[in-house]
Image (cartoon, rainbow, N blue to C red):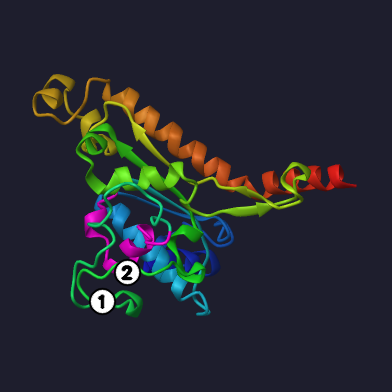
Amino acid sequence: EIIAATRYMMELNRTNIPELRGVNFVGKLDLEDIHYMGHSFGGASVLYAALKNSANNNNDSSFKIRSIVTHDVMADWIPDSTRLSLFDGERLKDSKTNHTYWTKTMTTTMSDSHHKGRGKQSSSFHPSSSIHNFDLFLLFSHQWESNNWGGVEVLQDMYKRNVFGRQRRIGKNNDNDGQQQQLSLSRVEVVDSAHHIEFSDLCMITPTWLARMVNLTGAESPLKTAKDIHTRTLNFLMEVRGQERTSAILSNNNNHQTK
């Protein structure tokens, strides 16, 4: 459905639909700037959709997704093929975290032929179809981090060891034996004192005293938490949208240094 909706928006950019009664999107959508975002099960859905679209990138109707943002992703519900790509065995081979739960298949039948068989460990990642070929921003609530839900501990470990998300090679560094530098915009972050439901607007339309009584919100004001979530997400998207310019500047600077 997510892929179908994206293609429908692409069609709106090409063809006017009379049923919209005067609303015209033709030529107004930037099809080179597509980002997927989802909360909870929606986070699992956008990860799956992005990887599926990437695997079908030879199809004329496919499109390029620039980044993926998830808020408290329900990693347990991601289909095996996508979850095994996110919790990739090769990237976790040096990890000291207990990641067995995340690197085994949950079902006996899978569409991904590389990972068939219950309990089988993830194979080495294949760069042509890895979820880590995308710029990733996985934002978690304090509630999920404290309960280690969604594989947050394992994902934080991957991020700290610089094996999380898309890696770019930019320029050359004279201090690094002329090797190309690695740049990654991907990250895993946690919103202090936030609860899972605070990624939605429910807490802002619920009286604070009631929301805290039923454990919907943390100690912070729901409005402050919402602003924090907004700022972190927007900063990531702004960095991704400016990545080509940043990479070009760094590359040019390094080239000038080597001349």
Of residues 72 and 163, the one drawn nearer to the viewer in this rendering = 163
Question: Could you say which quadrant of the image residue 31 lies in?
Answer: bottom right
Per the image, label 1 sits on a secondary structure element best described as: loop
Q: Position of residue 255 (x, y in %)?
A: 83, 48
137 vs 42, left or right, is: right
Q: Is residue 128 magenta?
A: no
| Span shown in magenta | 72-90
- Dot 1 corresponds to which residue? 110
Q: Position of residue 29 (x, y in %)?
A: 54, 57
- Is 84 magenta? The answer is yes
Residue 2 in sight from this viewpoint: no
Residue visible at 48% across and 53% down in the picture: 165
At a point 51% along the width and 71% down the height, the residue shown is 128
Indicate the secondary structure of the residue bearing disc 2: helix
Labelled disc at residue 81: 2
Mark 1 residue type:
Met
